[in-house]
């Protein structure tokens, strides 16, 4: 089992569709047996 740290922010969470893509990526990593630490910062142009 790996521990994976992933950070998402800016354009990668800039639209509802991109947020769904990030969520699917996280789910797939967990289903593969990995432990995740996920950091989500602000959406693009919001800070």
Image (tube, rainbow, N blue to C red):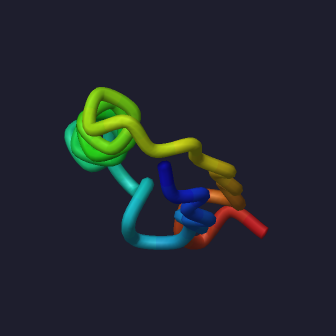
Q: Residue furthest right?
A: 47
In the image, 32 versus 20, the foreground residue is: 32
- Indicate left or right for 5 with 31 as reference: right
Q: How many marks?
A: 0
Q: Where is residue 15 drawn, in percent x and y?
A: 33, 47
Residue at x-position 34% and y-position 47%: 22
Q: Is residue 3 left or right of residue 34?
A: right
Report the residue at 51% width, 58% height from top: 2
Q: Residue furthest front?
A: 1
Q: Quadrant of the C terminus?
A: bottom right
| Quarter of the figure with residue 27 | top left
Please state which of residues 10 and 24 is positioned toward the viewer in this rendering.
24
* Among the 4 quarters of the image, the one containing residue 45: bottom right
Decide if residue 21 is on the left or right side of residue 42: left
Residue at image location 68% in from the left, 59% down from the top: 42
Question: In the image, is residue 9 above or below residue 35?
Answer: below
Foreground residue, 9 or 27? Answer: 27
Q: Residue at x 60, y 67 (%)?
A: 7
Expressed as whole percent of the image width and height from the top left, the position of residue 43 reads: 57, 58
The image position of residue 21, as x and y in percent, is 23, 44
- Tell me: residue 35, above or below residue 30: below
Task: Check the image and report above or below for 16 versus 47.
Answer: above
């Amino acid at each position: 089992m790996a521990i994976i740290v992933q950070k998402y922010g800016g354009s990668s969470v800039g639209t509802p569709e991109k947020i769904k893509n990030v969520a699917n990526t996280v789910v797939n990593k967990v289903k593969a047996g990995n432990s995740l630490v996920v950091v989500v910062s602000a959406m693009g142009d919001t800070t």
